[in-house]
Structure formats: structure tokens, C-alpha cells
Image: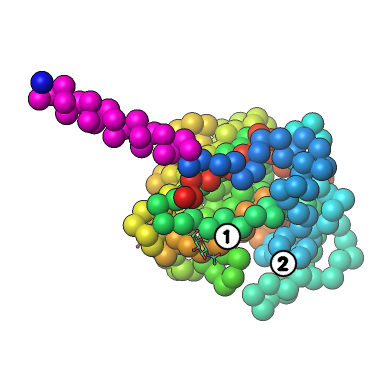
Amino acid sequence: MHSLFFSSLILGAASSVLLARETGTRTMIPKTCFDSIADFENSFDYLYPWGTDHNGAARMDKDHIKISDGVLTLTATPATGQEPASSGGKSIDIHYLSGTVYAKDHFNVSGSGGYDFTGDFRATTTRGTWPAFWLTAVKGWPPEIDMAEWKGSGKISFNTFNTSSKVESKNVDYPSPGDFHTIKSELRDLNGKDVQIKFYLDGDLVTTQVGKDFTGVPMYLIIDLQMEGSSGSPGPTGDTEYEVKNLEVLTYNP
Ligand SMILES: *[C@@H]1O[C@H](CO)[C@@H](O)[C@H](O)[C@H]1NC(C)=O
Ligand SMILES: *[C@@H]1O[C@H](CO)[C@@H](O)[C@H](O)[C@H]1NC(C)=O
């Protein structure tokens, strides 16, 4: 009697939690986002939110972004005669033209909320190639969460920046870069202030990190193919491709 009462109570509580989670889930970016240019433009925009350049040797333009049959392809091509980029007060020589896209929505983990970011990625780990899938602050910096970053070393990196010097970084071997691999990041509000991130590679939890004061702070989602910079140099003398498919973003924000 006793145990029956309590187990039905627990079952009842468990199913209402499940129900709340189910009904609380909404799709922010659907898996069809790379099916056509129109689908893409519903959710994404071209280049970086701030323009064509960032902290590497690639300058982004629309010609190096292709959307076809459910796949986003960014291509980096060697280029000469470009004006240098300027980043953080430094001048950076441009050696490539490449592609970057960002989501039109901002991602702001609210109290007791969160997001799931999932996708299949084909990314190189060749020296001088720096593909990434990441979140960065809309205003100021941090937050930054690198849901996947390949820095030309044969590894994949997962990072969370509390400040420029307080960084949690996990680098693991990246098998068969010629194949697609599934990346998933689960962001959840931890305590009304901090955001916990669980990073998955091919279904396995690789690391759990915590971003300080990330709750309630809007972030951009960026998919870019930077070159050289943190990935070493010189980069490849031919074209480099970075492909993404089955990208989906779900929100658990109340
Ligand atoms: C970042 O801040 C969170 C929350 O205070 C903490 O748990 C985490 O260890 C910090 N990371 C680093 C690298 O200091
Ligand atoms: C982030 O989301 C919270 C709750 O959904 C909202 O109260 C807050 O205004 C948002 N912050 C910004 C800067 O958009």
C-alpha cells in the first residue's frame, strides 16, 4: 500500500516532468534548413554578424557558400592581392577567400531553460584549416562556447570561455576526418546564472563544462571555415571544403 502509493506518486511526478519537457521543447532551426536557399535564408544569414573578416587568414564572401540537397558547403580557396584584415588591433594577411554563415536568431539560455544543437559535420584537420561550429556573445565577450573546432592538429576541440584566461578546453583525437561525424551540444541553465554544456561526439559524451554568468546572455551561432591563425600555417595550396547537414536547434527555454 505504502510503496504502491509512493511509486504512483513518483510515476506521476516523473510523467509530468516528461510532459513539461516535451511540451516545453520547440524547434528554433529545423533539420530542413539546408534543403534550399529559401530554407537557408529563413534561419541563416551570410558571412559573420560583423562582416567578412575575423582572426584568421580567410576573408568570407557569398561565392564560397553553397546550399544544396540538405548540405551546407563552405569552400576555402587560395587568394592573392587582398587587403590585410584587422583583428584585435593586429593586421592579418589574407591568403584565402572562404565561407561563413550565422543564425538569424540569438540564443539566450533563460532560467531553467536551454538548447540542444545537433548536426553532422565533415571537417578537415589539416594544418592551416580552422573549421568551427560555435556560439559567441552578441554584445561584448564572453560568452563563447566552441561546440566543435578543428585547429589543424588532427584533434577536435571543445571549449568554454569564462574570460580570455579562464578557458576550459578539451582536445580529443578526431577519427577519419573524411567522414561525417555527429556533434551535439546540450546547454542548460544550471543555477539561474551559469550554463552547463555537455559536448557529444558521435553520441558519446566527451566533456561537461560550465560557462560563468552565461544565463540570459544572447549569443550568435556561427559556422565558419577560417584558415591559418590558430590552426598553423602555411595552409593548403588547393581548395578546402567543410560540410554540414542535419543541423537542428531545439529550445527548452520556458
Ligand atoms: C567557469 O566558471 C564556472 C562557474 O563558476 C566554473 O564552474 C568553471 O570551472 C569555470 N571555468 C574555468 C576554466 O575557470
Ligand atoms: C534573455 O531571455 C530572458 C528570459 O527569456 C529575458 O528576460 C531577457 O530579457 C533576455 N535577454 C536579452 C538581452 O535578450
Looking at the rendered structure, the secondary structure element under dot 2 is loop
Task: Give the percent coordinates (x, y) of residue 62.
Answer: 84, 53
Q: Amino acid at mark 1?
A: Met
Residue on which disc 1 sits? 219
Q: Position of residue 207 (x, y in %)?
A: 41, 44
> What residue do we see at 39% from left, 33% from top?
18
- Mark 2 Cα shell of 10 Å, populated few (<14), some (14-19), many (≥20): few
Residue 138 in view, yes or no? yes
Residue 99, compared with residue 7, is above or below; it is below
Question: Looking at the picture, does residue 148 appear above or below residue 213?
Answer: above
Amino acid type at mark 2: Trp
- Judge whether residue 180 is colored magenta: no
Q: Looking at the magenta stretch, what is its main secondary structure?
A: helix
Q: Is residue 200 visible?
A: no
How many numbered markers are drawn? 2
Label ID, residue 50: 2
The secondary structure type at the circle numbered 1 is strand
Pointer 1: residues within 10 angstroms few (<14), some, or many (20+)? many
Upstream in sequence: badge 1 or badge 2:
2
Horizontal relation, residue 187 to residue 77: left or right: left
Q: Are marks 1 and 2 in contact (CB under 8 Å)?
A: no
Please tell me which residue is depicted at 66% across the width and 35% down the height of the picture. Answer: 31
Between 235 and 83, the residue placed more toward the observer is 83
At a point 53% along the width and 58% down the height, the residue shown is 108
C-alpha gap between disc 1 and disc 2: 13 Å
Q: Using the image, tell me which numbered label, if any, was put on residue 51.
A: none
- What's drawn in magenta, residue-wise? 2-23
Q: Position of residue 238 (x, y in %)?
A: 82, 45
Q: Is residue 14 magenta?
A: yes
